[in-house]
Image (cartoon, rainbow, N blue to C red):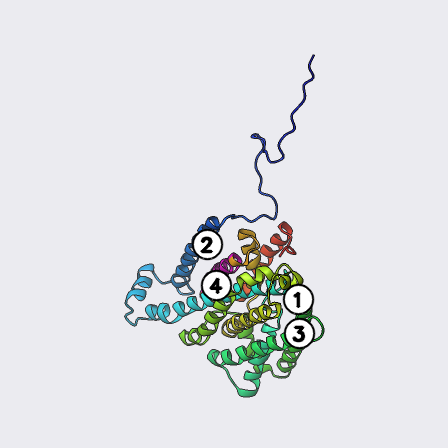
Amino acid sequence: MAAVIDAPRDAGAVAVDQPVRRRRGTPLLAGGWGRAGGLVVALVVLAVVAACSVAFGAKAIPFGTVWQALVDGNGSTDHQIVRELRIPRTLLGLGVGGALGVAGALMQGVTRNPLADPGLLGVDAGAALAVVVAIHTFGVTSLTGYVGFAFVGAGLASVLVYLLGSAGRGGATPVKLALAGAALTALLTSLTSSILLLDVQTLDVFRFWAAGSLAGRDAEVVAQVAPFLIAGAVLALASSRALNTLSLGDDVARSLGQRVHLTRGLSALAIVLLCGAATAAAGPIGFVGLTVPHVARAICGPDYRWILPWSLVLAPTLLLAADVIGRLIARPGEVQVGIVTAFVGAPFFIALVRRRKLADL
């Protein structure tokens, strides 16, 4: 009797009765066309959320009235609410959300730290101290007045962190930047707390800005921060290819001809422009810059040429949706968007941590 010898199964073959499962850690969308098509769908979702931001609010306005206000305002109270409050608020949410998402992705790429967010380089702490000084020393009480001080404070804090992280041998390494940011944030936060504890009136004015909100921001605030947001976004998107090389490590990047210090410096400049303008306009808003880049990375993979555009779309979608929720759940008042993003982002980020390895940048 001839012996029956089983032929070895091809390693690449998959049994027809076995379900094909996506390997853990692989992106949801593969290939340029799939990622581009998904990005178009994400843009459509963003447009729907933006329309909801204009249509819904603390005051119920019929859809017909909202449409009339968009087409041809007649000066009525409802039309003024839509044209002078909701539209600037929505535009600011688009800009601030996109800035926080892109800046968070840049920070995680430059520092190779999966927990990096706009607060890592002292942006939030610098802006907060500048606003407190503006209120306490110069008597500034308007949102338009906060923007200039907060932007300068955020920029100076970020530059100081980069200078501290660049000192010594090796230049601005990811670990040194993170340590310098943590140290300076602690110092600036203590100074801010000292002023607030000594001046209750400053605390009463400051706490509205510190909650993080899109409410009360008019077209003037949008116009003030728009140039910085656009410049930062353009600079960030132009750095995407260099970030891919930088993610391989400094030594490998140098061997491939990458100018590491220049790339890191330009990325830091983009972060200052984006985070400084966003924090100045809306106050410190957490979890957007931390969570959204991980969601983008889970969808499109580790390529920053896709992570940055996806973050630019997903972050304002999250921020505007949280803002709409905050307006609807507490009528006729509203819950600040910074509080809503914390409630939404914290459990979502915990679930993301449990499902994915965040160290894989």
Give residue 159's position: percent from left, percent from top.
60, 77
Disc 4: which residue: 323
Disc 1: which residue: 174
As for residue 104 lying within the magenta part, the answer is no
Give the distance between the C-alpha atoms of the residues marked 3 and 1, in whole angstroms.
10 Å
Nearest to viewer (mark 4 / mark 1): 1
Give residue 242's position: percent from left, percent from top.
56, 63
Magenta stretch: helix, strand or loop mostly = helix
Residue drawn at (46%, 79%), measured in percent from left and top?
Answer: 144
Nearest to viewer (mark 2 / mark 3): 3
Q: Is residue 54 visible?
A: yes
- Residue 180 relative to residue 150: left or right: right
Give residue 261's position: percent from left, percent from top.
61, 70
Mark seen at residue 39: 2
Q: Are marks 2 and 1 in contact (CB under 8 Å)?
A: no
- Kind of residue indicated by mark 3: Ser
Please tell me which residue lies in front, 288 or 66: 288
- Kind of residue indicated by mark 2: Leu
Residue drawn at (61%, 52%), measured in percent from left and top?
Answer: 351
Mark seen at residue 166: 3
Highlighted magenta segment, given as a residue range: 306-331
* Mark 4 or 3, nearer chain start: 3
Give the distance between the C-alpha atoms of the residues marked 2 and 4, in whole angstroms.
22 Å
As for residue 316 lying within the magenta part, the answer is yes
- Mark 3 element type: helix
- Mark 4 element type: helix
* Mark 2 or 1, nearer chain start: 2
Nearest to viewer (mark 2 / mark 4): 2
